[in-house]
Amino acid sequence: MLLGKYLNKYYIKFLWLYLLGIASLVVLDYVQLYVPEYLGDIVDYLSNGETEPVYDICLKILFIAFVIFLGRMIWRFTLFNASQRIEACLRRDMFRKSERLSQRYYHETKVGSIMSWFTTDLETIEEYTGFGTVQIVDASFLGILVLVRMFTLDWVLTLFAILPMLLIILWGALVEKYMALKWEQRQEQYDRLYDFSQENFTGIRVIKAFVKETSEIHAFAKEAKKTRDTNLSFTRVSIFFDNVIELLIAAIIALILGFGGWFVYAFATGSAVVIFGHAIEFTPGDLITFTGYFDSLIWPLIAMGSIVTMHSRAKTSLKRITDFMDQEEEIRNPENPVVLQDVRGDIEFRNFSFAYPSKPDVPVLQDISLSIHAGETIGIVGRIGSGKSTLVNILLRLYNVPEGTVFIDGQDIMACDIPSVRKAVAYVPQDNFLFSDTVGHNIAFSDASRSMDQIRSAADFAAVRENIEAFPDRYDTVTGERGVTLSGGQKQRVSVARAYLKDAPVLILDDSVSAVDLGTEQTILENIRTRRAGRTTLVVASRVSTVEQMSRVLVLSEGRVEAFDTPERLKEISPTFQRMVYLQTLEAEVGGGDRRA
């Protein structure tokens, strides 16, 4: 049995299915051993010219056939059902775990590896917990039961058959660790292939734009060849292992037929064979029965070999999944968290400094101290890499921060319930991620019960309603993976509509109008001023025109607060803001200020 802390609880949960399935297997194994006995009796009766008992025996065999049919239905339904339920539960646990892991984990772990754990590794565990259970029961119970019957019939011939079986057990023990190593190498290569494929599918437009299809095909061929070679290496070992098992089984059959035929001939000629003081009296029927018993033993012998291979694979896959499930959850609720309710939107940073967990010695933000009052519309500007996105991401509680440094409505964010913090904030990220769904469903992502009128209102707020209603399918238009069917500006505005419809006390737009023209930008900003009046809005921007009508503007420079004041005042005191104004004026003079699409 495959044991693991994330697996054992499901053996208990579905124990009734396993018990019913194993019980049906045991009954089936016991009943089917009457068939060789009955066949031997038929041969002996016919050899003696008796036909009447044969009809009764045939009826018994038909009844056993019905029991076998019913038993196989039961164990297939119960054991395979249990294994598939275990796979589903384990996949659900893994998905929930993936939702709780931090941003850092996904920066350090490739998507292809994670997909491999969710597919091939889970399928391997499902196979072992289902069909592997069948093999274990048959290899143990049926194997022992057959050996008892064989010893009862003739212990000398059974010894001749059993000695090569010890070689099978020894062979399996020797090969198991090597098989596990080969399987792990195979899975790791599949991880690399998944990674390569995922990156290429995601960046297919870049590949086409740079006419790199041929070179990427060659690169994929190299990865595919490595995968093929690794898989073939594992398959060769597996086939060689199985062939050795089959050769040993064939050798045992040859021994049985050779010695059994000798015993039958000696008995028929009246000169019984004596071995170890034991006179062997073997009738033709006994040889048929003994051969039938060993034929029933072939499957457990094959199962023993298959169990070794399957167990080594499942053990490796479970280890990979366990390593994933054991990952530390860095972002967790504190004990007795404060649940934010009726959030006004007051935000405060007190001597706040921050460095990403992957680079703890490289501070991104330093000594940030500022207060944002509820209902203010705040602009955030600065050069690339100044920490603008990091600052607003902190409010989503995506990272741990020092206690007593970040507050929402006077409550320390580190002492608050994480879901309540995130419910209080609506966020439009820089990459404007859209799901492969309809435009309407993307906009109503925060609450699927929103009415179509509310969806249209949100689209109107983001100045994208006219674009959507020009589509043939309107709000039922499918955006494609990551919104590939929409333009950059349309994706940004759909993302803005989605955040607006959440109706959160705090709205964050992280450079979310950079891909629209100035006229559309001004429409969105005007809607923010009118339709979100009295609610806190933070707008990260790269253009002065985006923030020049804001209540106040925060200017960041190299992770520090350079200035935090009204736009008019910043023109006098902030060198960074002054330069942004100068560059925008220069852009307008050369005619570039109104050409964004």
Image (cartoon, rainbow, N blue to C red):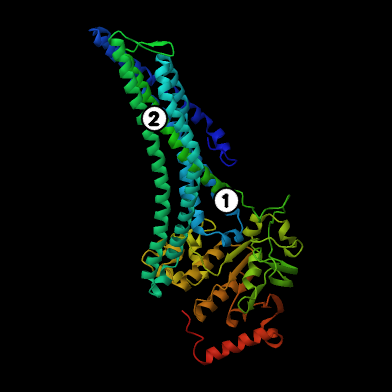
Residue type, mark 1 in image: Phe
Q: Is residue 559 left or right of residue 111?
A: right
Q: Are marks 2 and 1 in contact (CB under 8 Å)?
A: no
The quarter of the picture where residue 531 lies is bottom right
Residue at (72%, 69%) from the top-left corner? 353
Asked if 274 appears above or below 298 in the picture, the reply is above
The quarter of the picture where residue 154 lies is top left
Q: Crowdedness of circle 1 by 10 Å Cα count: few (<14), some, many (20+)?
A: some
Front residue (pair 103, 339): 103
Q: Crowdedness of circle 2 by 10 Å Cα count: few (<14), some, many (20+)?
A: some
Q: Is residue 481 left or right of residue 347?
A: left
Residue 232: percent from left, percent from top: 39, 50
Asked if 72 appears above or below 84 in the picture, the reply is above
Residue at (72%, 86%) from the top-left corner? 573
Residue 405: percent from left, percent from top: 75, 65
> What residue would you read off at disc 1?
324
Residue at (66%, 58%) from the top-left corner? 421
Spatial distance from mark 2 to mark 1, Cα to Cα? 36 Å
Q: Is residue 320 left or right of residue 341?
A: left
Asked if 358 appears above or below 541 in the picture, the reply is above
Front residue (pair 543, 140): 140
Q: Nearer the viewer, mark 2 or mark 1?
A: 2
One can see residue 288 in this view: no
Front residue (pair 7, 435): 7
One can see residue 566 in this view: yes
> What residue would you read off at disc 2?
299
